[in-house]
Amino acid sequence: KAGVTQTPRYLIKTRGQQVTLSCSPISGHRSVSWYQQTPGQGLQFLFEYFSETQRNKGNFPGRFSGRQFSNSRSEMNVSTLELGDSALYLCASSGGSGNTIYFGEGSWLTVV
Amino acid sequence: SQQGEEDPQALSIQEGENATMNCSYKTSINNLQWYRQNSGRGLVHLILIRSNEREKHSGRLRVTLDTSKKSSSLLITASRAADTASYFCATGGISSGSARQLTFGSGTQLTVLP
């Protein structure tokens, strides 16, 4: 069974640009969540999607958005990039009756 | 903001020794999960313990949970160099509104010397 797949793995963007990150959850999982990891703030929850609906949102500005498709794949978008958005963005999926949450390898975003 | 703190922040041991990491959290939880992260990589799920469980084992891992003290510990026995990584506890719970919204500790950096 394939794990959580995130693309791209690495990317470099310029301040002011926008970026879209993609996540394919484990087959059969309907919940996808996103996290940001930085040295200063650690791991922080961005949002969670379930059956194409956003269920929870963390304390991030509106520049951070996401969506989920009918096949449970998810994308997150960051607009008007700032230097402080440089981070490892992690996608996680979970499903069934259990609450075990599995993470992907992450997307490393560098904003210059 | 972080749910709690992990202790110690860094731990260095010799191969074959046991490593114990502690995690404290602040609010009521449904469950607590432990993850490992190798440098620059994603999080690898190690073990989940529910709020009504006190102890759980998985291979060389032993996790305990004390909800009255809002704390958990992860014990890795007979450590190996390959265990070198950062270890995080994460709580999913009542206060977050979703068991699937995790709040992470600050992590323990474990170094196992060969």
Image (cartoon, rainbow, N blue to C red):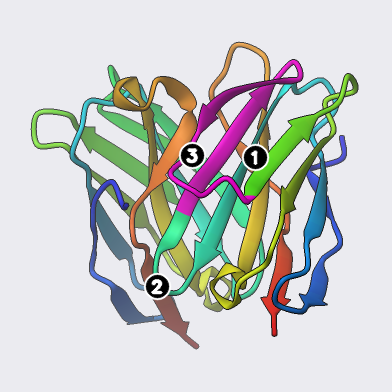
> Furthest-top residue in view?
A97
- Confirm whether the magenta stretch covers residue A47: yes
From the top left corner, tell me how far across and down residue B66 is, in percent.
Answer: 17, 33
The residue closer to the viewer here, A4 or A89, is A89
- Give the structural element (helix, strand or loop) at label 3: strand
Do the residues at discs 1 and 2 belong to one chain? Answer: yes
Q: Is residue A98 above or below residue B42?
A: above
Residue span colored magenta: A44-63
From the top left corner, tell me how far across and down residue B25 is, in percent.
Answer: 22, 43
Disc 1: host chain? A
- Give the structural element (helix, strand or loop) at label 1: strand
Which residue type carries mark 2?
Answer: Gly
> Furthest-right residue in view?
A71
Q: Quadrant of the C terminus of chain A?
A: bottom right
* Measured Cα–Cα span from mark 1 to mark 2: 23 Å
Mark 2 and mark 1 in contact (Cβ < 8 Å)?
no
The residue identified by callout 2 is A40
* Measured Cα–Cα span from mark 1 to mark 3: 11 Å
Q: Is residue A49 left or right of residue A5?
A: left
Q: Is residue A53 left or right of residue B50?
A: right
Q: How crowded is the residue under tag 3: few (<14 C-alpha within 10 Å), some, or many (20+)?
A: some
Q: Is residue B94 above or below residue A8?
A: above
The residue identified by callout 3 is B47
Q: Main secondary structure of the magenta part?
A: strand
Q: Which residue occupies 41% across, 55% down?
A: B88
Specify the label residue A102 is tagged with: 1
